[in-house]
Image (cartoon, grey):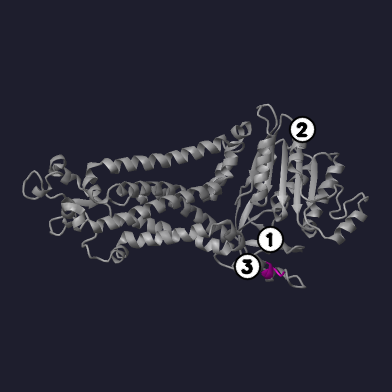
Amino acid sequence: MGYWILNETTTFLILVTWLGLNAYLFIDTFIWYENADLYYYTRVILGSTLAWARASAMCLNFNCMLILLPVCRNCVSVLRGTTVCCRGDLRRLLDKNITFHRLVGYMITLHTAIHIIAHCINIERYRVSQSVEAGELGNILANIGNQSSENYLNPIRGYNKNIIKEVFVSVAGITGFVITLALVLIITSSTELIRRSFYEVFWYTHNLFIIFFIGLVIHGAGQVVRGQTPQSMVLHNLSYCKDHYYEWGETAQCPVPQFSGNKPATWKWVFFPLVLYTCESIVRFWRSKQEVVITKVITHSSNVLEIQMKKSGFSMEPGQYIFLQCPAVSRLEWHPFTLTSAPEEPFFSVHVRAVGDWTQGLLAECGANRTQSLEPWQLPRLAVDGPYGSAATNVFHYDVSVCIAAGIGVTPFASVLKSIWYKYCSARNAMGLKKVYFYWLCRDTHSFEWFADLLISLEEQMSEQGKTDFLSYHLFLTGWDENQAAHIAFHCDNDLDVITGLRHKTNFGRPNWNKEFRFIAERHSGTSIGVFFCGPKSLSKILNSMCRLHSSSDPRGVHFHYNKESF
């Protein structure tokens, strides 16, 4: 409970506020449409499904207003840099912007389903209202609008009409179908399997949000749901006329009621977010046109390519990431990559592993598969958007930080560790960070190779500075064959590790996280410790539970603050 209060209070309050606003808007709108006199005659035909349709539409407007805000990355970066959000719960909250984006997407899907089901029932009830089974009042209401002086209530103008045709020739029907189709494609392509295995599919279908919002703004123009006009309410005495419908049009007290639809209001909800996102897009487009010079391309083992670049005005912090575009591979796709260089270096770099069509295409364009390196003028043009902040940028905000990486997830910490190295090389080192624990889990020995040089340099620098206790490496090899095991066992007495060349020996198998966290907690009692992770979701859950388990309920005790990379 203590861990939860310290780490998740702000997140919980934001989540409860969002859910509370959804509940309030739904219930308030539902009750209003269930009781408003303006919609009394509409309820005679539709019943409670009118309120279900309108309440879900209100929540859709609210969540569609929110859905774009978390992905306005420049705005999030500005907030991260403010004094109020520079550290603590608020900064960790900003790191969860994509998680909130997903939650809002799920809420939109839920209310879309409610809205569609309610309107499907409404359409059938509109049709049935013209039959004998609807009763006399229902028949009268359904036939209002047959005279030129009357405004209709029932948009289905005939019992024998083809309902499907009637729906799809209307503005509300066409736009509703387009919106739903776009939403289904966006949601299904956003699953983790698609994003990791077919990122291009995820990227292209996610851009259907443009069609989604255009359809959303137009959708209300159909004015399918209609209620009495205010003027008609003044002339038409509802309390008397609703029971004397057989007198409608025959007495001055009960003129035939007039009806009209609601004016479109969705644009009022989404106008500001769309303007803000448009400004974001303009900034990104301007950045994409800035010249990027590739200064060096290095091919590492395990299909990893290091690309070093320069760009005018580019400024970064350790652990940030950029979006990369290669027009020679695709003019539309932008892919996120963590920066592996340090701010102190005269260039910025990324490490790209070939795991999909786009990354394989980039490696091919950069000559990774060629025996001879390409000349600078032969290298492809790249466009860069960013940098943007991520969880790893918070490493220096703690006295003690625990950095945990799995496989290629080590890239955010490459920048952090390099920056640490440069800070210790500088005579003006004023770093608040006192201790770093670094854990790296790899399936094979080749994955260690491209990162080992940095670790060796760091280890030597710490030794020269007399800071051997500052940085603790814990490298774990989770997969090996019999030949490797025999070779490792034969050289186990060497001063340096046979795999990495480090003084810290490589461990085999998976770490006992309970033991590791207990050890850290005992060594740093009364300290706030930042835990940073980049890797698979399954391991993330384990680490998060370890942080909860080993955090003290006493505010003066040790507390682990969990941070996961998410972009």
Identity of the residue drawn at 93% across and 51% down: 494
Distance between mark 3 and mark 1 Cα atoms: 12 Å
Which badge, 2 or 1, is on the more N-terminal residue? Answer: 1
Which residue of the protein is positioned furthest toward the bottom in this rendering?
371
> In the image shown, does 41 or 309 lie closer to the viewer?
41
Q: Which stretch did the figure color magenta?
A: 363-367
Percent coordinates x, y for residue 364 in the rendering = 68, 70
Q: Main secondary structure of the magenta part?
A: helix
Q: Amino acid at mark 2?
A: Glu
Percent coordinates x, y for residue 530 in the rendering = 68, 39
Viewed as shown, does residue 95 lie left or right of 309?
left
Where residue 149 sits, quadrant-wise, is: bottom left
Residue 237 tag number: none
Kindly identify which residue carries mark 3. Answer: 357
Percent coordinates x, y for residue 384 in the rendering = 61, 58
366 falls in the magenta region: yes
Secondary element at image label 2: helix
> In the image shown, does 494 or 353 lie closer to the viewer?
494
Distance between mark 2 and mark 3 Cα atoms: 47 Å
Kindly identify which residue carries mark 2. Answer: 522
Residue 162 visible in the snapshot? yes
Secondary element at image label 3: helix
Viewed as shown, does residue 525 lie left or right of 194?
right
Distance between mark 2 and mark 1 Cα atoms: 38 Å
Kindly identify which residue carries mark 1. Answer: 352
Which badge, 3 or 1, is on the more N-terminal residue? Answer: 1
260 falls in the magenta region: no
